[in-house]
Amino acid sequence: MTTIAGQRRRLALSRFWTQFRHDRAGMTGLIILGIFILTAILAPILISPDALDVTQAEGDRFDPPSLAYPLGTDESGRSILLLLAWGTRISLTVGLAATIISMVIGTAVGIMAGHFRGVGSHALVGVTDWFLVIPFLPLAIVLATVLGPSTLNLIIVIGITSWAGTARLIRAQTMSIEGRPYIERSRALGAGNWHQMTRHVLPNVFPLVLANTTLTVAIVILSETTLSFLGLGDPLAPSWGAILDRAFSTGAVSQGAWWYVLPPGICVVLVVLAFTLVGRAMERIVDPRGSTA
């Protein structure tokens, strides 16, 4: 039985990849993501942390792009290109880590809210609606201010404030799965709630969770950029939002230092677009209505 299940998974993955690689938009997003992920992995290997030290900067203040500094320098004479490379690592780390927290909470709450009935289900739905009603940014700002500016706190804040949409989506899918015959047979055979949720419901909602994850990463990276731009991130970590924050606070715009503002903004746009393209492609593949269109 284990061998048969493994063969089915490999066949499903092979079929998924075959459909995905024929999706031009999805492949375009995947290539862009690959470039950024490779940059994040190689950043600490190719770039010494000393290059980010203000006391080690060798360039002049707001130097324009040149052969020595392809994207110019910041207010301290540091290379913008090196800051962006390290910022890629930090922004992607925050985005992925916070998304994992959000997906775990949202999936667990959604499955339990859709599986159980009565007071417990109503309570979970009420908490979910509460998080959906409260505007995300003010809540995140309050929590980030209370916890203090750091990368870990930023991950926690974004993760615990961005799960409600996923929970609503998974709950709807769970309620649809709960009406299928094999769930009824499982109950009739004496399967407990944990067995039903983990062995029957979770595998069936997992493709939707995976597709929603890629879309959520894009939103989380935008949230990280916004909070860091507002000064709520780690002041010592050169994330893209922190770079934009320093650019505006040091007067780069008024001095015409466009190379300090545009590159991090373009990086944010490209990564968000890439995750969105990949997520939409996965959504089209896992949604049976989309595959027949």
Image (tube, rainbow, N blue to C red):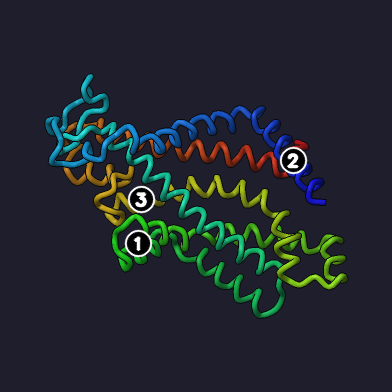
Q: Residue at x 83, y 66 (%)?
A: 186
Q: Residue at x 62, y 37 (%)?
A: 281
Q: Could you tell me how far apart the alpha carbons at marks 2 and 1 are, in whole angstroms?
A: 42 Å
Q: Amino acid at mark 3?
A: Thr
Residue 201 position in % (x across, y down): 73, 60
Task: Give the side of residue 256 with respect to residue 32, left or right.
Answer: left
Label 2 element class: helix
* Residue drawn at the location 70% of the way across and 43% of the way down: 286
At mark 1, the secondary structure is helix
Mark 2 nearby-residue class (10 Å; few <14, some 14–19, many ≥20): few
Q: Earlier in the sequence, mark 2 or mark 1?
A: 2
Pointer 3 residue: 226
Which residue is identified by label 1? 141
- Quarter holding the C terminus is top right
Report crowding for label 1: few under 14, some 14 to 19, many 20 or more residues within 10 A (C-alpha).
some
Mark 3: which secondary structure? Answer: helix
Q: Nearer the viewer, mark 2 or mark 1?
A: 2
Residue to which mark 2 is pinned: 12
Residue 207 at x, y = what percent?
A: 67, 48
Q: Is residue 20 above or below residue 6?
A: above
- Residue situated furthest bottom in the rendering: 119
**Residue in view at x 83 percent, y 60 percent:** 180
> Mark 1: which amino acid?
Ile
Q: Residues within 10 Å of mark 3 (few under 14, many from 20)?
A: many
Q: Is residue 213 left or right of residue 59?
A: right
250 to the left or right of 238: left
